[in-house]
Image: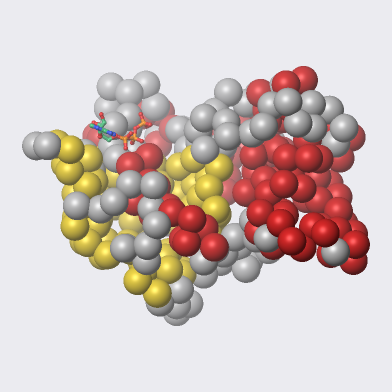
Amino acid sequence: MTAPLLSLSGVSRHFGALKAVDDVTLDVPTGARHALIGPNGAGKSTLFKLVTGSMPVSAGTVTLGGTDVTGLPEHVRARLGISQTLQHSSLFTTQTVEQNVLLAAQRRHGSRASLVPRRQAAARERVDGLLADVGLDHRRGSPVADLSHGERRQLEVAVALACEPRLLLLDEPAAGMSPAESARLVELVRALPETVTVVIVEHDLDVVFALARSVTVLHLGRVLLTGTPEQVRASDAVQEAYLGTGRESLFTDTAGPAALGVG
Ligand SMILES: Nc1ncnc2c1ncn2[C@@H]1O[C@H](COP(=O)(O)OP(=O)(O)OP(=O)(O)O)[C@@H](O)[C@H]1O
């Protein structure tokens, strides 16, 4: 079995009496395509914050590649290879598409690197590759303000990848995307190298089932089930957790990823 890149052991986060994340233990192997799902308020975003370090745990340990990062601040965890796309855009809207990715690449390698012409050329080449990967090469000179919602989400993925992550956390990347944009996102994530481990929080379960090889279902802060997409779809407990959310049918119909046209 592949060694876990990310290990959570007894991770909890309390807000007063509310246990937003409650004793979560989870191993995410290197190269995984792992989804974190659950109804609204299940604790998904909070758990992401505990992994990135933007919020401290109340209890438990977070380990990345065998290193205990629980006490480390967010920027140090980022340097160790954790990168996140955010639900709320963190892009520089007055800058162009290309500038946003270049800035992220320069931050990764230190601003001094941008003064060395050879490194500058390498960074530009990398930016070209990333923009092609996310399908935004034709928009490179456009200010972010001119992009559609879906294009912004594509750019956020390019910015996150420019940080050369070992662990890429995608927080609702398909939110507000058209079906065509969602399909493109699925293709993009599928094409990422196995050196990038992906954990995705996503409400669009067609996207989840098209991408994930393993799924953890959170409910009321606790792990309800971790298993294959098939096991999750077949679980009565998961269907019950989703009762009344309007998304139950995704566990009972057979359309799944085909609904996105990505097979
Ligand atoms: N800073 C905070 N202070 C108090 N309560 C919080 C805070 N952040 C989250 N919560 C609560 O913790 C619980 C889990 O919230 P969280 O946002 O992690 O859920 P989620 O699964 O990401 O939900 P959604 O799918 O709606 O984004 C919710 O009850 C929420 O109201």
Q: Is residue 126 visible?
A: no
- The image shows residue 169 at horizontal and vertical percentages of 51, 50
| Quadrant assignment for the C terminus | top right
Left or right of 159 in this view: 219: left
Residue drawn at the location 40% of the way across and 74% of the way down: 67
Residue 72 drawn above or below residue 98 = below
- The image shows residue 231 at horizontal and vertical percentages of 37, 52
Q: Hey, which quadrant is residue 9 in on the image? A: bottom left
Q: Hey, which quadrant is residue 41 in on the image? A: top left
- The image shows residue 218 at horizontal and vertical percentages of 29, 44
Q: Is residue 1 visible?
A: yes
Residue drawn at the location 54% of the way across and 63% of the way down: 79
Q: Nearer the viewer, residue 90 or 262?
A: 90
Left or right of 148 in this view: 117: right
Residue drawn at the location 32% of the way across and 32% of the way down: 39
Q: Nearer the viewer, residue 120 or 143?
A: 120
How many numbered discs?
0
Left or right of 184 in this view: 135: right
Where in the image, quadrant-wise, is ligand 1 located?
A: top left
| Quadrant assignment for the N terminus | bottom left
Furthest-left residue in view? Answer: 17
Left or right of 33 in this view: 11: left
Say how the picture is coloured. Answer: secondary structure
Q: Nearer the viewer, residue 247 or 117?
A: 117
- The image shows residue 252 at horizontal and vertical percentages of 40, 34
Residue 1 drawn above or below residue 97 = below
Residue drawn at the location 43% of the way across and 54% of the way down: 74
